[in-house]
Image (cartoon, grey):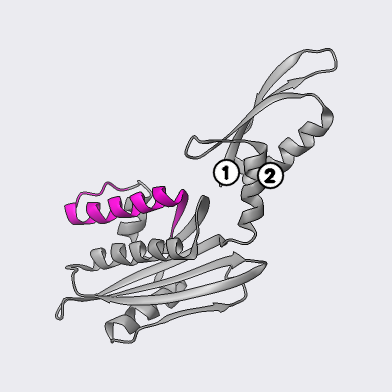
Amino acid sequence: MKLMIEWVYETPTKQQITFKSEAIPAAHAFLLIEDMKKTGRLKSYTMTDEHDSDWTWKELKKFLQELEIEPHNVQLYFDGGFNREEKLAGLGVVIYFEQNNQSYRLRINQQAHYLISNNEAEYAALLLAIEQLEELGVHHQTIEIFGDSQVVINEMNGEWAVSDNALASWADKIDAKLQKLGLIAAYHYIDRKQNDEADHLANQALSGTAIIAKQPVKRKK
């Protein structure tokens, strides 16, 4: 989560000046307000997040304390495969996150019989990944999303218009879930080699091998 701060500072000559920051990480905003309070010249301030919600210093302090024991620094990888002959899709998801000073990796896949194209399989894999974030308790933060589907990545980040009605429905479901969880998604297109874990999980799903595993790992860079 990032916050924009607007504050009124009083100079030694009692002149009041209003300042406004760019959106900065929540932890930085907390330390900045804490430091300005020590000067005794901070007359007032407001902190606003990406959803235009205002935060008090106490609310932010509580949020940051809770964040240490909740999943954060999330990196999400997704991939969808589609067998046209069998009309069968395989969905693969890999999620890296930190919790209680430990890094974890969650791997999960799923077979789907209700899709009609590879693009739908990619969207379905992304929705499955977001649903897993809800299960993990991820909320009110920025997450990094990586995929090798130019269609999904460019449509979800707004670079391409979603012209297909079926895909638009998937995009709406994903956006609604992100909004419900208070998540801001940063989308990144990567090539298939960089997405090999999610790709492998999708192929395993197609072959009928179900995977769901969470384990401590070294952080993926």
Q: Earlier in the sequence, mark 1 or mark 2?
A: 1
- Three-letter residue code for mark 1: Lys
Secondary structure under badge 1? strand
Badge 1 is on which residue?
2
Q: Which residues are magenta?
A: 160-188
Secondary structure under badge 2? helix
**At which x and y percent is residue 200?**
39, 80
> What is the quadrant of the C terminus in the image?
bottom right
- Three-letter residue code for mark 2: His
Circle 2 packing at 10 Å, graded few (<14), some (14-19), many (20+), is few
In the image, residue 97 sits, relative to residue 155, either above or below, namely below
Residue under the image location 19 percent in, 56 percent down: 166
| Left or right, residue 9 beside residue 53 | right
Badge 2 is on which residue?
28
Q: Is residue 183 magenta?
A: yes
Residue under the image location 67 percent in, 24 percent down: 19
Residue 22 makes an appearance in the image = no
Circle 1 packing at 10 Å, graded few (<14), some (14-19), many (20+), is many
| Left or right, residue 194 beside residue 209 | right
Distance between the alpha carbons at the discs numbered 1 and 2: 9 Å
Q: Quadrant of residue 117?
A: bottom left
Depth check, front residue: 119 or 29: 29
**At which x and y percent is residue 180?**
40, 49
In the image, residue 154 sits, relative to residue 56, either above or below, namely below
In the image, residue 24 sits, relative to residue 85, either above or below, namely above
Residue under the image location 46 percent in, 71 percent down: 194
**At which x and y percent is residue 186?**
47, 52
Depth check, front residue: 99 or 143: 99
Q: Quadrant of residue 47?
A: top right
In the image, residue 181 sits, relative to residue 10, either above or below, namely below
Q: Quadrant of residue 34?
A: top right
Q: Is residue 155 magenta?
A: no
